[in-house]
Image: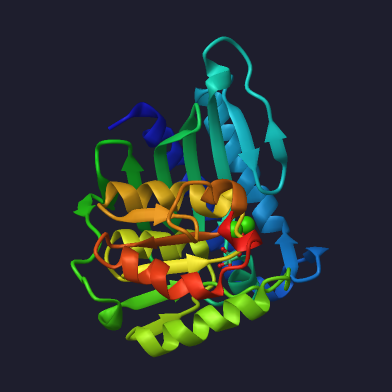
Amino acid sequence: MHPALNIAIKAARRAGQIINRASNDVDLLKVASKQPNDFVTEVDKAAEKAIIETLQEAYPGYGILAEESGLTAGQGTGDTEYQWIIDPLDGTTNFIHGMPQYAVSIALEHRGQMQSAVVFDPVRNEMFTASRGRGAFLNDRRIRVSRRAKLSEALVGTGFPYRVFDHVDAYLGMLKDMMEKTSGLRRPGAAALDLAYVACGRFDAFFEIGLSPWDIAGGALLVTEAGGLVGNLTGETGYMESGNMVASTPRIFPALLATLEPHLTDALRA
Ligand code: IPD
Ligand code: CA
Ligand code: CA
């Protein structure tokens, strides 16, 4: 196993412990609102701190992009080419409500390419990991995307717009067609886990608009290392920048894109 992946696993477990401990008393949580409907708790911050401490101890020079503390540039020759991308608690709204669907996501990028990824569900103790070229795993078991080939048989994960409503009409059009053309839609509420579920075959596809890099960096590598495809809403790269993303088994990908296509505005083609 790549040494950086080991460190990321250690960091995710530390964050998971903090999250699990706090989950017993969600009523006592202090919740702040960063923007309307964008919440942060002291748990997000404590988990992020524990992750960053663990990663920096092993790799002091690597850059960091973390949801709650932002960007820290890398230092030292060579090391500046590496960047950790961290979501300490993906699914904060679920967590605040005691809904057991949230995760820690940590990815390592080198010169714009994702190298290692960890998505950890502390509720179910499910550790999803991947390293470039070496496959994806759930705990110690190799995972692959599902073998389903038809969109009509697919169970599809998605996320609703909940903060920015610019694309809500386009999204509702997509949702309507997906309702009619798939075997079911789910909105679990943690994008990193949605992608992990595509990687292990629980979902056959996923689509969402307006995500942030820390929501998708780890999950994207899980999906591709599990044999799936990821892209923006036209199937190309650029999803890390636009935050508009699809993921699926290779055989479902064309039908997924074709279903979304009639609803794309110019802004959504980015
Ligand atoms: C959110 C979750 C959610 C998705 C949102 C994300 P957060 O992350 O991944 O499923 O729909 O777009 O912002 O804020 O809970 O880390
Ligand atoms: Ca997130
Ligand atoms: Ca988060």
Instruction: Confirm whether residue 235 shows in the render.
Output: yes
Residue at the farthest top position: 77
Of residues 30 and 237, the one nearer the viewer is: 237
Residue at the farthest bottom position: 180
Instruction: Confirm whether residue 100 shows in the render.
Output: no
Q: Measuring from the top left, give residue 100's x and y in whole percent.
A: 50, 73
Horizontal placement of 225 versus 99: left or right?
left
Question: Residue at left 64%, top 73%?
Answer: 161
Horizontal placement of 196 versus 96: left or right?
left
Quadrant into which the N terminus falls:
top left
Q: Is residue 77 above or below residue 123?
A: above
Ligand 2 resides in the quarter of the picture at bottom right
Question: Residue at left 57%, top 27%?
Answer: 56
Horizontal placement of 150 versus 39: left or right?
left
Q: Measuring from the top left, give residue 109's x and y in whole percent.
A: 48, 33
* Quarter location, residue 114: top left
Question: Residue at left 33%, top 44%?
Answer: 130
Quadrant into which the C terminus falls:
bottom right
